[in-house]
Amino acid sequence: MDQILQWVLFPGIVITLALSLLFSLKSRRSKEPRTRGINTARMNISMGFMLLFFASVQLFYSAESTLRIIIGAIFIVIGLFNLFAGFRNLSAYSSRGQEEAHRP
């Protein structure tokens, strides 16, 4: 079971970290507010998944201690908040772009 978790969680952390950095750089370099908002939302989504992967590592890999469970719970809460905010902002900026595209 530990081998399966290693092969899933570690690449998940690395991939979401790379995506977070990529979208952060794209967001900072963008001149257009809509593109900046979309990239920031994608960065939040990537960070949310990364924090959920970190929480999984804390909860599954270690001996059960109160401190690790608390840290894992904090990572889960922050990760879910980032996911919620990222998906909300992504839908808001995407719908704003569709409204602009339909204007004459």
Image (spheres, rainbow, N blue to C red):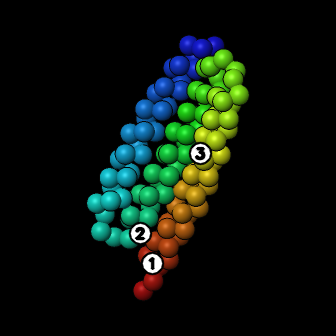
Distance, label 1 to label 3, CA atoms, is 31 Å
Which quarter of the figure is the C terminus placed in? Answer: bottom left
Distance, label 3 to label 2, CA atoms, is 24 Å
Describe the element under mark 1 as helix, strand or loop: helix
On the image, the x and y values in percent for residue 86 come to 54, 56
Q: Which residue is mark 3?
A: 79
- Disc 2 crowd rating (10 Å Cα; few below 14, some 14-19, many 20+) is some
On the image, the x and y values in percent for residue 1 come to 63, 13
- Disc 1 crowd rating (10 Å Cα; few below 14, some 14-19, many 20+) is few
Picture layout, residue 36 above or below residue 76: below
On the image, the x and y values in percent for residue 31 come to 30, 68
- For image coordinates 54% across by 63% down, the residue present is 89
Picture layout, residue 104 above or below residue 55: below
Q: Which residue is mark 2?
A: 34
Q: Please name the amino acid that badge 1 sits on.
A: Glu
Is residue 98 something that shows in the picture? no
Q: Please name the amino acid that badge 2 sits on.
A: Arg
